[in-house]
């Protein structure tokens, strides 16, 4: 029976590393007596480089103490090839000293319990019977980035608590989601190989984030590191979780597309299934080189957070706004902006807003600590923007003759999205600003399409939308869709005066964690009279894994995590900046106001 096999595999006869780490072997099963007398045992399969498992470390550390105090035990199992040599250091790094660390080098425990990912949790009784099988909690939902809210359900803790108290477990099984436990199979040498087929794919699509000092949790810039995560690479590629690219093909033609073709995904899958063969590594392409320091050269103006921000090891994501006075005494023309995240282990993305009215300063003064918290925006309608940064996004110079205006005396309100990674961290992010050296003839403006919303509790498919007529000739440069956690779909379409419909963007699986600014390859002409239409759909049901309320609550427009928004920002240049309507539109935005001509779509059109 599975339970007897598992209990037999854990014991005291193979103690290593000061009596805190157990090794397993398929040849000799340690005695069953190792766990007799325990009220209950929680077993969690974990991985050194799995961000989802590491995210749960504070919760596991607390669980280990609770179990120990009530006659139970937490066992952490390291089954990934190569993890065993780092198990003790990893457990110490994440404060897991009260857990029993087991090195499952031959993956006997993985096979005995049927574990598939990290983290995968089990609760066993004194006889080794599995009482609970599944996730630790709903924190993260199996994504490489957290969902932005604290977990609503703690199934492992609840199950262990019930078992220790001799009570029935209410939820006995959930889906374990996380990083695939890599197999032990040796390379067969058959099928695609790293040198010829896989390295080019990783270099072009993955290495920019998955290398030393970047946000990717594991390095993918060498054969050894890529092979160690072959099954995980294949899984996230097949599910199109990675590389993170949300726009639907055919709905806007963008630069910087991070998307694998079907043929590339098939190559990666076959490579992983055939044992991740190396091929002739001498023929592998050299990994791309990345600039050290400022990518675009020394900026004309560098703004930096006045002090470091402390990021807690666990808890809900933080959206912190830092007010950085620009100090400019005359209007400036900005042709490039480069954000440098101080700690990419916890900085998820950065957005820059302009404030000429001191509103951010007042909000900062009203809240203790550096900066202030605001979830969806800076807490006010900004006077402009200074671009932003997200993983994989590289800074760039605007085309000749085009600039972002930076008004004199303005503040940059820099919103930084932080996510915890299981241990205390700190960050000091900075931004470099580049001023125009050549004459400027066009200025970037922002046209916000804003749809109203009032989402009933439990509504699984709430639809809203808005329309806006172009009042002057313009060209779209980029588009930024924005919703919160309940958003599912968003699309923007332009209907030209001729009646031709031109899709500007469509996202069918919205994920707040992977929102971005999408630059068009070619400017999109929006003649006067063009009708811009925004449509969006939301899921406010309990079945939505990103649901921030338990039970679901009615949700309206607002700044909080549990509120919602529905906006698409269109970056544009006016064909004629002296056009009276273009000037009026620009002056309204500079005053920190949204245009009043927006109207909701009729119910039938949503």
Image: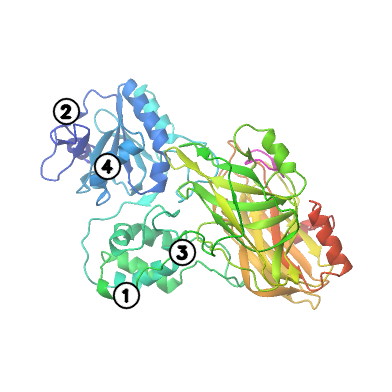
Q: Is residue 555 magenta?
A: yes
Residue at image x 62%, y 41%?
561
Magenta-colored span: 553-562
Q: Give whichever of discs 2 and 1 has the lower sequence position.
A: 2
Q: Secondary structure at mark 2?
A: helix
Q: Which disc number belongs to residue 87?
A: 4
The residue wearing badge 1 is 196
User: Which quarter of the rendered picture does the N terminus lie within?
Assistant: top left
Q: How many marks?
A: 4
Q: Earlier in the sequence, mark 3 or mark 4?
A: 4
Mark 3 surroundings within 10 Å by alpha-carbon count, few (fewer than 14), some (14 through 19), many (20 or more): few
Q: Residue reaching furthest bottom?
A: 498
Quickly name the residue at label 3.
291
Majority secondary structure of the magenta segment?
loop
User: Could you give the CA–CA distance between mark 2 and mark 3, rounded to whole angstroms?
Assistant: 58 Å
Q: Which residue is mark 2?
A: 33
């Amino acid at each position: 029976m599975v339970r007897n096999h598992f209990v037999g595999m854990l014991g005291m006869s193979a103690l290593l590393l000061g009596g805190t780490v157990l090794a397993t072997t398929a040849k000799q099963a340690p005695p069953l007596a190792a766990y007799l007398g325990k009220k209950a045992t929680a077993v969690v399969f974990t991985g050194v480089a799995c961000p989802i498992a590491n995210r749960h470390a504070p919760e596991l550390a607390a669980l280990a103490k609770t179990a120990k105090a009530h006659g139970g035990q937490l066992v952490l199992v390291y089954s990934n090839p190569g993890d065993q040599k780092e198990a003790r250091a990893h457990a110490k790094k994440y404060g897991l000293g009260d857990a029993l660390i087991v090195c499952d080098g031959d993956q006997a425990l993985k096979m005995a319990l049927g574990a598939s990912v990290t983290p995968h949790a089990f609760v066993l009784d004194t006889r080794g019977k599995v009482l609970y099988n599944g996730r630790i909690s709903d924190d993260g939902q199996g994504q490489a980035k957290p969902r932005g809210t604290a977990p609503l359900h703690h199934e492992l803790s609840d199950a262990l608590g019930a078992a220790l108290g001799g009570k029935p477990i209410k939820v006995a099984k959930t889906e374990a989601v996380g990083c695939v436990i890599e197999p032990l199979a040796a390379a067969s040498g058959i099928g695609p190989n790293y040198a010829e087929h896989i390295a080019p794919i990783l270099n072009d699509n993955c290495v920019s984030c998955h290398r030393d000092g970047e946000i990717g949790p594991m390095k993918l810039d060498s054969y050894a590191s890529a092979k160690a995560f072959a099954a995980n690479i294949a899984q996230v590629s097949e599910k199109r979780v990675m590389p993170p690219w949300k726009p639907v093909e055919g709905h806007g033609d963008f630069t910087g597309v991070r998307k694998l073709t079907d043929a590339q995904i098939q190559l990666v899958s076959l490579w992983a299934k055939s044992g991740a063969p190396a091929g002739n590594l001498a023929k592998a392409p050299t990994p791309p080189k990345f600039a050290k320091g400022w990518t675009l050269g020394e900026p004309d103006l560098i703004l930096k957070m006045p002090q470091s921000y402390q990021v807690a090891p666990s808890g809900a994501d933080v959206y912190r706004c830092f007010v950085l006075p620009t100090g400019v005494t005359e209007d400036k023309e900005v042709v490039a902006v480069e954000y440098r995240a101080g700690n990419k282990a916890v900085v998820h993305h950065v957005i820059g807003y302009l404030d000429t009215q001191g509103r951010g300063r007042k909000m900062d003064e009203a809240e203790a600590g550096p900066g202030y918290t605001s979830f969806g925006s800076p807490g006010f309608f900004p006077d402009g923007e200074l671009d932003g940064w997200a993983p994989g996004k590289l800074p760039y110079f605007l085309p000749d003759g085009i600039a972002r205006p930076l008004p004199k005396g303005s503040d940059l309100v820099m919103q930084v999205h932080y996510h915890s990674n299981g241990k205390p961290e700190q960050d000091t992010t900075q931004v470099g600003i580049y001023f125009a050296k050549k004459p400027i003839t066009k200025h970037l403006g922002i046209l916000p399409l804003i749809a109203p919303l009032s989402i009933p509790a439990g509504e699984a498919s709430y639809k809203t939308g808005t329309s806006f007529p172009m009042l002057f000739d313009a060209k779209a440069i980029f588009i930024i869709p924005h919703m919160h956690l309940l958003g599912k779909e968003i699309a923007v379409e332009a209907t030209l005066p001729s009646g031709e419909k031109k899709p500007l963007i469509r996202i069918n699986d919205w994920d707040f964690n992977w929102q971005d600014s999408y630059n068009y390859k070619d400017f999109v002409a929006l003649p006067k009279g063009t009708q811009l239409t925004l449509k969006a759909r939301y899921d406010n049901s309990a079945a939505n894994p990103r649901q921030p309320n338990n039970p679901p609550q009615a949700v309206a427009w607002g700044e909080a995590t549990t509120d919602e928004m529905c906006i698409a920002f269109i970056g544009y240049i006016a064909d004629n900046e002296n056009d009276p309507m273009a000037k009026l539109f620009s002056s309204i935005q500079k005053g920190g106001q949204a245009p009043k001509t927006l109207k909701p779509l009729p119910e039938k059109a949503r």
